[in-house]
Image: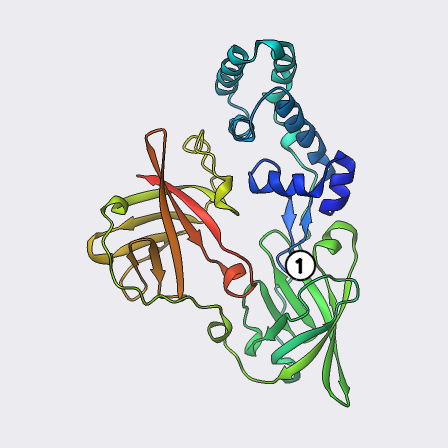
Amino acid sequence: MKIGEFAKICETKISVLRHYDREGLLKPVYIDRFTGYRYYDKAQVPLFFRISDLKQAGFSLAEIKALLSCRGNAAKTEQIFEMKKARLHKTLQTLENIQKTITGDDFMKTNYIPVKENINLPFVNDEDVIGRWKFVEYCGFSGNAEREFYFLPGGEQYWCFSWTKGKLLYDGGVNTLASDYTLEQRDDGLYMHLDMKTGDFVENGTIKRLLLRKLDGEHYTKDAIARKDNIDYPFINDTSVLGKWKSVAYLAHKEEFVPEGSDENVPENLYYKEIEFFENGHVNSVYGEELISGDNMQVWTKGYVLRKFNSTACAYEIRKVHGREYLIIEWKSGDYRWGGRETDYYVFVKA
């Protein structure tokens, strides 16, 4: 369900849910990469009320996040509660009631089922579709009216989209969708009718009827249309960043980061594994199983990792919390380069 429906069920404001999302407490099960819509699962309602209970008992949002992050760790959960009880004698009974349920993780589970349509279709060319298009009618879809879209030669994928004749193919990591299109020649140009499958289709089967007008038939490449940063920075030394760092968290907003428990609950599926800074601007990174190395690929200077291979300047900062240093680096993925989104972040600790 969309954020508005979820807010109504929880009897709260959308702004509260957005704040919980930024704080990393209650995140949508799915954010449609095309529309930016947030979708929640009804099974997340108990989590919302559990957070409300904890707030009422006197926990800060940072404390709640630390508590939820150690679910399944009964000893850690017990320690946090006992410390809070010592400070809040008047709410002892409330805390004990919450303690009985917080050690379980049933309220963290969702019933969300991704849609996995077959997008491994053989490529069939459609020369008329190659080029740059502009959305002119949204038919119920709220988005940027200035949005432009590209069909690259050979069905090449850019961002999360590729295509074959009659189909726009979407791979958002969670859902894979195949949307039908047809072309119509009008007096003022070529138009496309696109039956777009977005998060609404995953939620309730609704298809958005979109109309696009062709702007040109240029054979663009994904590199040519990508957003590019200035990466022409002189080298400035920063001894504080030297050495190898291991990733411990991925964040949509860096304000979400809560260091407590981060080293103990590192997600297994972090794509950006590690980064190592050397003297004179040399830097190595590990993405998945791939090592990115060499000054022709990327370098660093004080405050930035300059990724030459995709023309992005990723700012970094070091935060010291409870005597531990954390490195927070911008992660400029396809959502940033082609989707017009803001940057995400990775958090690292010294290896």
Would you identify the image quadrant in which residue 175 lies? bottom right
What's the image's color scheme?
rainbow
Which residue: 65% across, 22% down? 56
Q: Is residue 156 visible?
A: yes
The answer to whether 20 is drawn above or below residue 189 in the figure is above
Which residue: 45% across, 36% down? 266
Relative side of 341 to 249, left or right? right
Relative side of 301 to 153, left or right? left
Quickly name the residue at label 1: 35
Which residue: 56% across, 30% down? 61
Would you identify the image quadrant in which residue 100 lies? top right
Number of marks in the rendered image: 1
Q: Position of residue 304 (x, y in %)?
A: 34, 56
The answer to whether 99 is drawn above or below residue 125 in the figure is above
Q: Amino acid at mark 1?
A: Thr
The answer to whether 91 is drawn above or below residue 300 in the figure is above
Q: Quadrant of the N terminus?
A: top right
Determine whether the residue tagged by mark 1 lies in a helix, strand or loop: loop
Q: Quadrant of the C terminus?
A: top left
Among all residues in the image, which is located at the extreme bottom?
A: 187
Mark 1, residues whose alpha carbon is within 10 Å: few (<14), some, or many (≥20)? some
Which residue: 77% across, 90% down? 187
Camera-side residue of 12 and 200? 12
Q: Position of residue 177 (x, y in %)?
A: 67, 60
Q: Position of residue 218 (x, y in %)?
A: 56, 84
Q: Position of residue 26 (x, y in %)?
A: 62, 37
Relative side of 273 to 276, left or right? right
Camera-side residue of 72 and 223? 223
Q: Is residue 27 visible?
A: no
